[in-house]
Every structure is written in structure tokens, then in C-alpha cells.
Image (tube, rainbow, N blue to C red):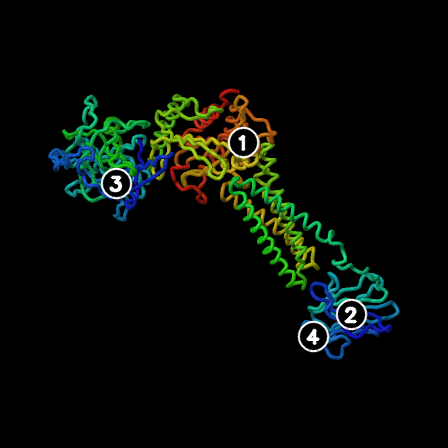
Amino acid sequence: MDDAVSPASVAVLEILDRDGQVRQAHVVTAWPLRIGRAIDNDVVLSDPHVAAHHLSVAGDAGGLALQVGETYNGVLAGARRLRSGEQLRLVEDAAPGEWTVGRTRLRLRLPSQPLPAELPLAAAATRARRYGPVVAALVALLLALAFNTWLETDPDNLGRALGGMLLATGMGIAIWCGAWSLLSKTFTRQTYFGWHLKVFLLASLAWLVCDNLPDLLGFALSWPWISDFGFVATYAVGAAALYFHLLAVEPARPRLLRGVALVAFGVGVGLSLWFNHQRSDRLGAELYMSHLFPPALRLARPVAADTFVDGLAPLQAVLDKRAKEPPRGDDGDDSDEE
Amino acid sequence: MNLARPLRRSSSAVVGRIVGAAALAVACLLGGAVAQVPLAADAASAVPAPPSLSARKVYEQARSQLVQIRTVLKGRASQTSVGSGFFVTREGHIVTNFHVVSQAALEPEQHDLVYVTADGREAPVTILQIDVRHDLALLRAGDAGQRSFDALAFRPEAQALAQGERIYSLGNPLDVGFAVMEGNYNGLVRRSFYPQIFFGGALSGGMSGGPALDQEGRVIGVNVARRVDGEQVSFLVPATFATALLAGSRDAAPLKTPAYPAVTAQLEAHQADLTARFMRQGWKEATHPRYHVPVPADEFMRCWGSSEISRTGGLDLERSDCVMDTRIYAGDFSTGAIAVRHESYDGSKLGPLRFASRHAQSFRNESFSRLRAEHQTRPQCHEDYVDRKGLVLRAVVCLRAYKKLPQLYDVAVLVATLDQSTSGVQGRFDAQGVSYANAQKLARHYLEAYAWTTP
């Protein structure tokens, strides 16, 4: 920071980092303000992509205006690129204008612009509000995982399996959230560990629901397709988690990150469908619905054996057509045993 | 063909498979490499026998009628497999196994067949007819017009052999040289779909298609297979099928195109027989305290059972596995068999939720792919809840079509009972190489066998 801002200041020019934090601030005491790489500028930028006299801001009867100097790269103001000689009139009572010159981001704050309210420090919030949701999510996840472990383990092995599950979950959380925090730290100089932990916990809970609910519905209603394509919902959860994790790595560009998450979702689903088709000639993940729940949860009505066997008839045409196609892939082993 | 799993490669003659609790392994005798057991006296006859005079006599009489059948890669002069055969007419008809000539029969554009006599005379040979059901083939020497041949005579069917009678199996084991193996006639193999002779003697790879002779040197059977998990447990195709093949096709024109149409037609006939006999034999009674669970009568199937008590307080189960020894060798794979199995689970130590999880795991752990993609399509399945007089089942039927055997399919039916919260039964039925109508008929037959014993 420069010297304290004197009452004579007419503006503050801030040089921003790529994450939006202020790296340097220049007090402007008089117009015009000349910005460029040459030494005779009011603000000297040592960015090689900046021209000698890149731009200047000056006032006249109509108010302040930005004037682009002799530059090859021009000035990026929002989505608009200003070329050499172009002029941009500044709005003096709205949010500060942000421009990119070369690779440097600038923000000009004027006294007439509204000042956003002070942000409370995280520490100022109550403990319950800071940690409550995270602890609740963690407890819920551990309970869900413990239930899964209980479900899949024989009674005599339960203690060991629960211990293993706890250890694996703890390690998993530490490694996953640690890696994301490292990324955040690299790009934003803050770890955001709490944020990554929250995203991970909520995403894991959502993933568990999306993974099991289609199976249960498939069983209850005899809808094989719903568990067949249940993976789409889990991929959606994965993509959402990716978006929120990335948000703490590149907070300034949420739209880009939404795009990245959508593309990842699309690519993931597309690849899975393609892979399933290669493997089994079907788009779904399961050859048949193999999820069995307690009989009381079945809602679908059973059919008579005759009706069921009659339902085989349409498969013959499909099989006969496939039998004439040249072979693709190789999934059998010519063994005699099934 | 019964119990016969022909051997293809000249390096590995052993084909093992596990059926139920017992290891059942059968190898056919085509160019194999199994440690040769000297033809000493039987373990049963404690007296060490001197070299048998009759074996020498039988071999000397049959030597000129005996041939080795070689399948040769066209234009490469290297053999892909070897077996044995024997002349049955003066006009040069030769009998051997189908599996000895299957490569030449199914891929004639890539393979040639030659016969080689004990004196080393070599000449081409053509296929007149095949019998895949009994694993036989009728060939004719390519030089038939130019010479006459010594032929072996068949023993008249009316003269039945007695159990324990000495018989002699001839052939060229492992391409080592012509040999005679002495053994005993032990009657017919039990629970075989097609009749097959149980030969108490050693057979080795390469002897497939060779003759088995009585003490007068008359043909009683054709060497076809052996069990690799037993000692001197070998199998012969009864001579009557060879005489029928000869009578029906001695004037047939040589086969020039791939024999798939003939294989398909014979498999069609086999599956019609198999389906009819399987359905006629019905199901066993009292297979489960709560349900009628389909377990086939064991006319031509063998059922093995086992039980497992969980040592970790988990799922206890009982298993039944019914399989046929007979399967039809159809070139690169075998088909034409039926298998029925089930597992019944007791999850009372687990409670409903954990039992359901185990039930689902077991239901998921099933494969519906058997043959490579060049032989079979991928499975197509149909599934639903099926009501069997109040008993609710989850049923899945998956079918695969054969690519080179049109209108033949493998069908698998998977069933899980869904009426109790901590116990249940899962069953599976498999039929290979059946018509679509029979696949549906068998699936219905199997599903309809499920019910409560007392509603």
C-alpha cells in the first residue's frame, strides 16, 4: 500500500490478482491518470503485454472517460475490447469499473461509488453456526457408512469391519479434502478446508441416496430401467460436487466452472453409455435387476408363469438379428461352465 | 457323444472340470500329451501278467486296418491335430471320431485330411458323413479306386460282451506310434444320455477314433474319451452307431463345404430328444421343507449336493448341482447339455435387512456369457415377478443365439423366492443349443416346478 489516502484523493486505482484480491493500490490525487509501461506514467505497470502509454483516465464537462493509447492489445472492459484511440465514458455512481490491460487487472474506485458493507470475519459467527452443519453431515455420513458396513458384514466380523470403515473414511476425507485444499491454496492463497469438507460430506450423502434409491424403486415397482440408469443420478451428484469444489479454487469464474461441471457430467454419462453398449449391446449398466430387498417392500404385482414366458417371444427377433451380425468384442471364454 | 471333451491341442490333453462336489474330468483322445501309463496288469488282478499273447495276436491282425488321421493346415504341411481311425470296408471306408476331423469338416478351406498307415503310407482322405451326437465320422480313402483295403469286422450286436471281458484298444497315442492297449469291458456308462461303453483301460490323446476290439479282433467300439481324474476310466462309442453310420452313408458324396448345416440339423434332433426326455423324467420329490424346488430325476443327470454353515455367524446355505456328463462337441465348443442347480439360504442369524443384502449379492453373482463373441450373441433378458400359486418369485430369463448354428439358443432361467424375510431359495436352469420353442417350453417347465409344499 502507498501512503495513507489524503483528503485530496480523487480515486484509488487497484491492481488485482487473478483471484480478485488487491495486490497494490495507488492513490490518485489529480486527473488525468496515465497508465503504461513507460517511466513517465502516473502508474507504471511492469507487464510486458502493456504498451508504453496504454491508457489514461481524464475528466471533462461530461465526467470521467477512459482513453485507450497506442496499444496492440487494447483494453478489455467487461466483455468489450477497446482498441487504440477508443474512448469509454465511466459511470461514476455504479460499481467500480474493472479493466484488463495486458495481463494485469485494474479496478478504479471513485469516491462517488457506493461502498459495500463490511464483511463479518468467519470467527465472528457462533461455533454452532460454523461447525453445526459440517458435524451433522459428518455424523450422517458415518451413520450411513456404518449401516452399509453392518449390512454387508457377518455378525462376527462387524467390529473389525467398522474399525476398517472408520479408518478408510477418515483417510479418504483427509486425502480428498487435503488435495482440494492444496489446489485452493495454490490458486487463491486460502485452503478453504471447511468448504471442501462440507462439499465432500454433502456430496457423499447425496451419492449414497442416488446410488440406493433407484435400486429400491426398481425392486419395489419392478422397474429394471430405473436401476439400469441409476448411474446418471450419481454422475449428476459427482458433477455438482466438482462444481462446488472448483468454486473454492477459481472463485472469480463461476460460469466457466458450471460449464466444466456440465461437460464432465455429459462426458461421463456419454462414456458410460458407450462403454455399456460395447460391453453388452445395451445402454444400461445392468443385464437384469439384481437388487433384492425384504419382500414386504415389493409393490409390483407378480404375473402368471405363462404370461411371463410369453414375454420371451419378442427377444427371438433381436437375437436372430444379432446372430447375423459380425462379432464385436469378446466376452465369453468358451468354457463349459456357466 | 457321452463324457467326451475332445482335445484339440497337441500340448494339453487334459480337460478338467468340477461338477458339484466331485471332480469330473474327461479328455478326448486327440493328439494329447498325458503321461503314458505302461500297460501293466490291472491293479485289481494282483498277479503280474506276462505280455499278453492275445494282445500281440489282435494287434498283428488289425495292424493293416489301422490308420492315423492327420489334419493338415492347407499349404503349410504342418499338422494341427492327429487322431486314429480304421478301415471298415474293402472299398476304403474309414471310421473315426467327429472331433478328429472337425477342423477339416467345419473349415475345409483351411484344412486337409490325410490318413497314414502303420507302414507309413500316406494318402488323402475325404469326409462322407458325420454324426455329432455320437461323435463319429465316416471317411473314405482318397486312393480308394486304385487298391482294395483290409477291413475290420464288427462284432454282431447279438453277441453281448460280459463284464470283465478282455478288450483291446488300438490307436496312435500322442503321435508316438501305433499301439495296443489292453483293458476290460465294464458295461455301459451309467446316466449317459447316449449309450457309451465303460472301458477299464488306458487311453491317451491321439487314440481318438481308433477301434476297440474283442479277443477275436472284431470291433466293439470306437475310442472316444477318458476321465483325467480317474485311473483307466475310458470310454468307447458302441460299434452299433458306427455300423449305422456306415450303412446310411457308405455311398454318400464327399463333403466339400463347411459341415455346419449337418451339425445344426443333428443338434436340432438332439435338442428335440433332450427336451422331450428331460420333460418326461419330471422332478424329484421333497427337495426343500418349504418349497417344491425343481431338482431333476437323475436318468441322465448327476446331482451333487453340499452345505455350508457360516463360521462368522452369517448365511448358511445348501446347494444342489445337477449336470449332464453328455455334451455334444460342435467344433470349437460343446453344447447340447442341461444343468439345474439351486442354493437354499438360511439367514435367521442375520435378520431381514442383512439377509436381503446377501440374497441380492448371490442373485447378482451370475454370468450369462459362455462362448466367445464369434460363436454366440450377447444375452437378451426378460424379467419380472412371477406368481406360482401364491409363491412370488423374481425370475430372469436370458437367451443367447448361436452364430453358426441358426435357430439354436442357450437359455438360462434365474429364480429367487421372495416370500420370507430371512430365508429363500435361488435356482438356475441352463439348457444349451435348444430351439426357441423348446427354450420357452423348458423355461415354463422349470418355473412351474416352483411352489409351496403347503400353501
The chain containing the residue under callout 1 comes to B
Q: Amino acid at mark 2?
A: Leu
Q: Mark 4 = which residue?
A: A46
In the rendered image, is residue B407 in sight? no
Disc 4: host chain: A
* Mark 3 belongs to chain: B
Task: Report the disc number at residue B422.
Answer: 1
Residue holding disc 2:
A13
Q: Quadrant of the N terminus of chain B?
A: top left
User: Residue lying farthest right?
Assistant: A61
Q: Nearer the viewer, mark 2 or mark 1?
A: 1
* CA separation in Å, label 3 and label 2: 93 Å
For image coordinates 30% across by 27% down, the residue present is B190
Residue type marked 1: Thr
Separation of disc 4 and disc 1 at Cα? 76 Å
Q: CA distance from mark 1 to mark 3?
A: 51 Å
Labels 3 and 2 in the same subunit: no
Q: Nearer the viewer, mark 3 or mark 4?
A: 3
Q: Which mark is residue B205?
A: 3
Do the residues bearing badges 2 and 4 touch, measured as CB atoms within 8 Å? Answer: no
Residue neighbourhood size for the residue with mark 2, other residues' Cα within 10 Å, grouped as few (<14), some (14–19), many (≥20)? many
* Label 4 and label 1 in one chain: no
User: Distance from label 2 to label 1 (Cα)?
Assistant: 74 Å
The amino acid sitting under disc 3 is Gly
Q: Which quarter of the picture shows residue A231?
A: top right
Q: Earlier in the sequence, mark 2 or mark 4?
A: 2
> Helix, strand or loop at disc 4?
loop
Residue B82 image label: none
Residue in view at x 80 percent, y 71 percent: A57
Mark 1 Cα within 10 Å, few/some/many (few <14, many 20+)? many
The structure residue drawn at horizontal position 19% and vertical position 22%, both measured from the top left corner, is B159
